Image (spheres, rainbow, N blue to C red):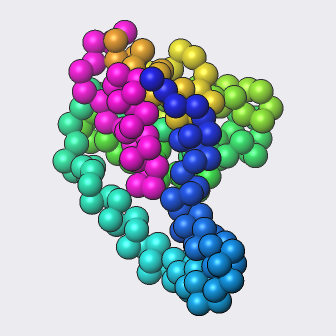
Amino acid sequence: MMLPLWAHKVGVVAFLPIGLCSTVIVIGMLLRRRCVCGLGLTLLLVASTPACGDWVISTLERSYATVGEVRAQAAVVLGGYSSQAGPAGKFQYSEGADRLEKGLELVVSGQVETLVVTRFRGSDGQDQGETIRAEVIRRGVAAARVVMTEGFAENTADEALETARLMRAHGWTQVVVVTSAFHMKRAMWLMQQAGV
């Protein structure tokens, strides 16, 4: 059973540093305890430092295979790496560009046979997946090794359902999911819910 969008998209904010620290501050205000409010602000300041951010990311990444350890029939690169602000038909990276780079690395090295590209609509209504597919082929991956999802994905839950459909259609038994460390636990849960 898939959870409603708010449960896995918006609900996660409660467990982010900003959500936890805000909760501590609100509790301090309700209890009229300055020390509790101060604790919440201190936690927020500490959580906002690069050292804390690096520690959180490295902790999250430790639980999953690195690129060198991966062998699978396909790599599913989850969205969030293409900017919709670029000119039509022109690929433009966003802050999640390392996802696509890792997916390309897996295909080029022969660790996976196929790269799965998700179809999604840009702000102009055009299929951004086609633009990304063209970029991947331009970068040297054979067109036969790039598979597009049939349906359009609006979110990770849609990508999970499309991945499950592709696995059945192609007879794949093992795929690797490429996403950011922060997103991995939620993405893996959604993939499992979809039957991947």
- Residue 77: image location, x then y, percent: 44, 38
Q: Is residue 56 above or below residue 157?
A: below
* Displayed quadrant of residue 115: top left
Q: Residue at x 47, y 72 (%)?
A: 53
Tell me if 179 is positioned left or right of 30 in this view: left
Which is more toward the observer, 177 or 71?
Answer: 177
Q: Residue at x 35, y 22 (%)?
A: 195
- Residue 90: image location, x then y, percent: 69, 39
Magenta stretch encompasses residue 186: yes
Which is more toward the observer, 71 or 187?
Answer: 187
* Displayed quadrant of residue 174: top left
* Displayed quadrant of residue 132: top right
Q: Residue at x 31, y 41 (%)?
A: 106
Q: Residue at x 73, y 26 (%)?
A: 126
Q: Is residue 144 above or below residue 59?
A: above
Residue at the right extreme? 124
- Residue 165: image location, x then y, percent: 42, 15
Tell me if 86 is positioned left or right of 13 in this view: right
Quarter in which the N terminus is drawn: top left
What residue range appears in magenta? Answer: 169-196
Q: Is residue 101 visible?
A: no
Magenta stretch encompasses residue 192: yes
Q: Is residue 99 visible?
A: yes
- Residue 96: image location, x then y, percent: 54, 52
Quarter in which the C terminus is drawn: top left
Which is more toward the observer, 190 or 51?
Answer: 190
Count of numbered tags: 0
Residue at the top extreme? 169
Q: Is residue 1 above or below residue 7?
A: above
